Image: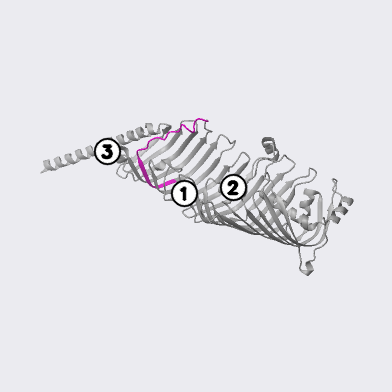
Amino acid sequence: MIKNVSRTWKIILAVLAVLVLLYVVVKLYVHQKIDSLLTDSAISSYQIAYSDISTSLFAGNLALRDVTITGKKDRTSNHSFTADQIEINGVQILKALTGTSLSMEEVVVHGFDLNYSMLRPKSNDSNNKQSKNFDRSIAINRFSVRNGNVTIERDSLERPWIKSYINDLNIKNIKIDSTSLNATLPFTYNTLDLDIDSTSVTISPYDQLTFNALKLNADSITLNNAAFKTIVSPQEIYDRFGMERDIFDVEFPSIAVKEYDLKFNAEMPEFTATDIILNKPIINVYRNKLIKDNPKKRAMYSELLRNLPIHLNIGDVTLKDGYIAYAEKRIEANGPATLFLTNMNATIAGVNTFPAEKSQIDIDATTLLMGSGDVDAQWSFDIFDERDNFTFRADVKHLNLESISPFIRNLFNITAKGNINQLYFSIYGDQDSSTTDVKIDYTGMDIQVLGSDGDENTIKTLLGNLLVAGDTTSNSGSFDNVKATSQRDKQKSFFNYIWISLRAALKESMTIF
């Protein structure tokens, strides 16, 4: 009996020893196979290293520590990636190493740094790209990235193109196969959640977009403390660019996007949303007109929208309690002339660039002009109208001309007194010319023409006031009503087009000749 028990224990211990040995052998095989896989020819353009690897064959878990992935520099990119740890959980390891399909429950990347440099391709590179065959399919139920830096550079820019800190990224139901690799986005997914801090995007050699926080989930996006600014001085722009250019200082305390969807189709990406809300934006634009004009043709907004490299369908874009200021320097001895709008509230309805769908955009806005005049404006145009027809209407009330005197003084060496009780105008135009209807009611109009020393030029002031028509008969309820036509200067902005159209009509209405 004792011998039988002893023999049984010997068998059990032998079996356990064999199992342990088998487990060790299989684990060594798995580690060697993983090493072999990571140096396989399919990924031979990368150098992969790690300090330690641990596996749990029964649980199907794998962990790599102190991971470094370096891309061998080619003609179009150069990149590197480091991570404190990469966890792969819920995978049938042996099947994954020997089969053509790979399924994982979860992949988690901790503490990473990604640096990616995009190099300008040589002229003959674009036609010599060959896609590699990919005979595997990969499925990941959950993919997470936690606490890492991303830096993407382009050799055409002095500063990083994108620099960002990612708190958390979670993507569900990722699938990668030969079909997805040929698409714009090389994988498909179900949902994506993203939490980002401290991000900068270099838009051009002169301008940069930054924001402090971005949160993105299945149906909404929130962006906090965003800013778009020109990051070089006006003089440096002139030294580099050789002509005038807008200087931007724009801030968005918060932006909210509701019920959005983003698709990366083979033909063109698509973005849809029910609402985009811009809260309390502050927009400052400066232009130095003493510098040579840029001769480049300016596109109308309808043309810009229909030529976007993405299809858009946005129900409403709402701007709440905004501030907009435009400053222009035209006379060397004077400071910039600044025109500002406060309490700006606007709705842009129907931003739709999908072909064969409703493509008219209607914009309604209310604001306060120079702290004095109440403005109610409407602007509409059709994105796919090749003639770029538009209608721009505005109703201005209770404008004290002394409030705009600082603007016209620095711009034209003129000051003004009086009141515009009501100014109503409609501009109907296209890419070439416009017709403007104006109705105006004003009282107490008096102008003062200044000399180069800032003092009044009495003779010019007298002549100027002789040219200005007397008060309109507002007490009887009538208005001066005139019509004028204008030609568009295609090297100027759309809002310059609006100004010269209105100016032509005001000249007809407010002067005696």
- What amino acid does circle 1 point to? Lys
Mark 2 falls on what kind of element? Answer: helix
Q: Position of residue 123 (x, y in %)?
A: 52, 31
Point 86% across, 49% down: residue: 455
- Queried whether the magenta region covers residue 131, the answer comes back as yes
Of pointers 1 and 3, the one earlier in the residue sequence: 3
Position in image of residue 367 (x %, y %): 67, 59
- Up the image or down, 118 lies above or below 250; here it is above
| Residue density around tag 1, few if under 14, some if 14–19, many if 20 or more, within 10 Å | some
Identify the image quadrant of residue 102: top left
Q: Amino acid at mark 2?
A: Leu
The amino acid marked with disc number 3 is Tyr
Relative to 381, is 55 on the left or the right? left
Q: CA distance from mark 1 to mark 3?
A: 46 Å
Distance of label 2 from label 1 (alpha carbons): 21 Å
Span shown in magenta: 123-144
Query: In what element is the residue under mark 1?
Result: strand
Residue, disc 3: 23
List x then y, in percent, for residue 168: 47, 48
Left or right of 451 in this view: 375: left
Marks 2/3: CA distance? 64 Å
Residue that numbered label 1 is attached to: 263
